[in-house]
Image (spheres, grey):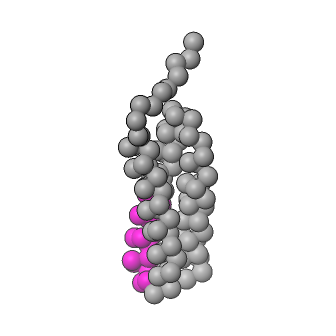
Amino acid sequence: MVATFHRRGPDRLQKFFLYLILTDWLLLIITAIKMESLSFFYGSVIAIMLFVYNLFLAHLCRVRARRAEDTYLIYPVVLGAFISFLLVSYFFILS
């Protein structure tokens, strides 16, 4: 028998996770705007930090979506990771 998960009151962890997703998108927008003016060192550091942040966010999304059946959270995280990959590849290949 499968145990169901019933929430009581507002889910603070869910709100925090949504803020992490919004922060990811904000970081991606700022990086995309400032990409041309970055030196190679700072660009590579920012690219690595964005990659690690997206890995962390994808792991949290996988755990959260499996546990609470919040599969709608997967789409913005995967799209953000894809855009992060495009920004990193643009910086390292075309710069």
- Magenta residues? 38-53
Q: Residue 9's quadrant in the figure?
A: top left
Main secondary structure of the magenta stretch: helix
Q: Please, which residue is most extreme toward the top here?
A: 1
Q: Please, which residue is most extreme toward the front here?
A: 9
In magenta stretch: residue 46: yes
Along the viewing direction, whichever of 24 and 84 lies nearer the viewer: 24
61 vs 39: above or below: above
Residue 23 % position (x, y)? 43, 62
82 vs 34: above or below: above
Q: Assign the C terminus to one quadrant of the image.
A: bottom right
Residue at position x 51%, y 49% in the image: 58
Residue 85 showing in the rendered view: no
Q: Assign the N terminus to one quadrant of the image.
A: top right
42 vs 36: above or below: above
4 vs 47: above or below: above
Residue at position x 61%, y 52% in the image: 75
Residue 91 % position (x, y)? 54, 76
In magenta stretch: residue 64: no
Residue 50 showing in the rendered view: yes
Q: Please, which residue is most extreme toward the bottom here?
A: 37
Residue 76 % position (x, y)? 58, 56
